Amino acid sequence: MKILYHHRIASKDGQYVHVEEIIKAMRELGHEVIVVGPAVAENSEFGSDSGWVDVLKAKLPQWFYEILEFSYSFYAFFKLIRAIIKHKPDAIYERCNLFLPAGIWAKKLFKLPLQLEVNSPLYLERKKYSGIALDKLAKWSEAYAWRNADRVLPVTEVLATYIRREGVDDAKITIIPNGVDTRVFKPKQPGNRLARFQDKLVVGFVGFCREWHQLDEVLNLLAKSQRKDLVFLVVGDGPVIGDLKAQAKTLGFEAQFESTGLVPRDQMPHWLDQIDIALQPAVTPWASPLKMIEYLAKGHAIVAPDSANILELLTEKNSRLFKEGDMHGMISQIECLIDDESLREKLEKEALATIDHLQLSWQGNAQKILSGYQFAKNEVIS
């Protein structure tokens, strides 16, 4: 099968992992994938941002930036037309973005089946966090894409409820969470443990840490225990790292606190091998957290909130859950795991079993996507 993959991601960050992994999995299954999207992402190193986009956002009036954003759809539409005429694909796969109806226009013009991957309710997300000037156009563009795709693929059931509210038939919705490459993210490899972490119990956080993660409280707990075998490892970066380093020094925990800074994607399995207790302090309510699935694949004892989207993957059987927003509850669960080695071992086994039970691999996701094209094709024909 020949698939045209369309996206508008201009930075090589966490969201681009999903793009790369799905494309790789489709190709490994024997399908040809033609990518139409900003070249800046493909040619960048992991962790790089879309600097010029951020500059435009900062310098231009919001309404004018959004007009430019919508205008990009016409450019993308012509790129799609050119790619479709040249490559003659059997189907389109698109990663949904706000102000981006181009894929639907191409689908209608060439009568091709289109599946739409949805990672968040972008209109509501942007309205809440950064505001929207062209409110009606933004809302229309998202709903238009959802309603006109042959199949809509949200990453969580929570997200699917937003899509249903816009009138999308449940029969056209298939939930496909994020995945993991189990050939790369293998169960923890003891031989990969760094010498400084040998015989240590490592509590770890992976990602971009901010104030609301309350890692300062985790640091307080670990320092208060006065256990010399405890280490707090932050794999990533963020605005609170400087404060955490200063706090660790004040608490006399400096030698037991480590932060890596931004880690290249291919080194992430190595750093996950250093962790015993993995933290997911907070998450947006509709997300399918990539790092949590990688925690499961590595076989970590996980501490996470009991939000609805998290409960689609975690239970009391494979993790320690705390009431969403209750950071004291999070600290209690960490404390519980520090003190109970047998519980940690039980959770590690259940975490590994979850990957197979829920089929959380990129290859499995690609197979679900590809099987959906027969349904989509029938819809187009009818």
Image (cartoon, rainbow, N blue to C red):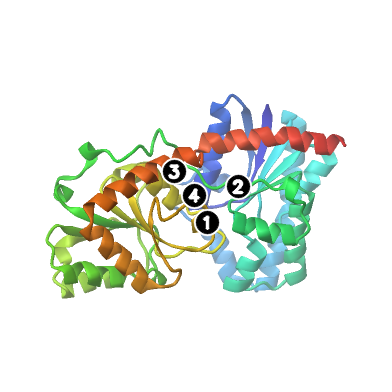
Reply above or below: 125 against 72. Answer: below
Circle 2: element type: loop
How many neighbours does mark 2 have within 10 angstroms: few (below 14), some (14-19), or many (20 or more)?
some
Residue displayed at 17% across by 50% down = 197
Dot 2 or dot 1: first in sequence order is: 2
- The residue that label 4 is drawn on is 12
Real-space Cα separation, disc 2 to disc 4, in angstroms:
11 Å
| The C terminus lies in quadrant | top right
Dot 3 or dot 4: first in sequence order is: 4
Residue displayed at 44% across by 65% down = 282
Reply above or below: 167 against 244. Answer: above
Real-space Cα separation, disc 3 to disc 1, in angstroms:
35 Å
The numbered disc on residue 340 is none
- The residue lying toward the viewer, choosing from 6 and 45, is 6
Residue 228, image x, y percentages: 11, 61
- The residue that label 2 is drawn on is 38
Q: Is residue 41 visible?
A: yes
How many neighbours does mark 3 have within 10 angstroms: few (below 14), some (14-19), or many (20 or more)?
many
Labels 3, 1: front one: 3
Under mark 4, the amino acid is Lys
- The residue that label 3 is drawn on is 354
Labels 2, 3: front one: 3
Under mark 1, the amino acid is Ser
Under mark 2, the amino acid is Pro
* Residue 222 appears left or right of 207: left
The numbered disc on residue 50 is 1
Labels 2, 4: front one: 4
